[in-house]
Amino acid sequence: MAHGDFRVTLSTALCLEYEDVLNRPEILSPSSRLQVREFLDSFCVLAEESYIYFKWRPFLRDAKDDLIFECALAAGATHIVTYNRSDFIGVETFGISVVTPAQLLAILKKP
């Protein structure tokens, strides 16, 4: 990753998973559904689409995390950014580092 440079990638399956999670009643009130849609629309415009041609499932303990792994792999990503680093054990085999948001910021700030 070049200094201060990063790309956000998203697959269709991952976007649909984000939509499902963000619209769960225990997470968001029904009156906020429009905000979720607007956020996801903006996120989709910002992100580059990754096309998944080969599924690696099951690879991780949680099948939902496999969606993130497959997207990163298809995009040629060098990093997955998450607070749940322990959920992605094994992805380093594919040259992908798992970092927290704070660690990503530190990487981006390096001269």
Image (tube, helix red, strand yellow):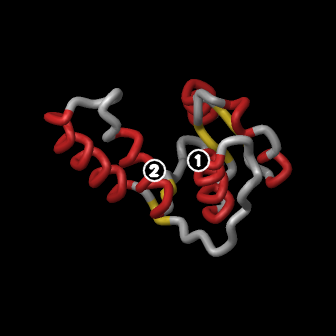
The residue lying at 17 percent from left, 44 percent from top is 34
* Mark 1 residue type: Lys
* Mark 2 residue type: Glu
Task: State the SS at label 1.
Answer: helix
Measured in 3D between alpha carbons, the distance from the residue under mark 2 to the one under mark 1, in whole angstroms, is: 8 Å
> As rendered, which of 31 and 14 lies closer to the eye?
31
The residue lying at 54 percent from left, 47 percent from top is 5
Across and down, in percent, residue 73 comes to 68, 59
Mark 2 Cα-neighbour bin, 10 Å: few <14, some 14–19, many ≥20: some
Across and down, in percent, residue 64 comes to 59, 47
In the picture, residue 94 is in which quadrant? Answer: bottom right
> As rendered, which of 91 and 17 lies closer to the eye?
17
The quadrant in which the C terminus is found is top right
* Farthest residue, direction left: 31
Residue 70 shows up from this direction = yes
* Farthest residue, direction bottom: 53
> Is 59 placed left or right of 81 in the picture?
right
Residue picked out by circle 1: 64
* Farthest residue, direction top: 102
Is the residue 27 above or below the residue 12 in the image?
above
Asked whether the beta carbons under mark 2 and mark 1 sit within 8 Å of each other, the answer is: yes
Label of residue 17 in the image: 2
The residue lying at 64 percent from left, 49 percent from top is 63
Across and down, in percent, residue 39 comes to 27, 45
Dot placed on the residue nearer the N-terminal end, 2 or 1: 2
Across and down, in percent, residue 48 comes to 46, 62
The residue lying at 63 percent from left, 75 percent from top is 53
In the picture, residue 45 is in which quadrant? Answer: bottom left
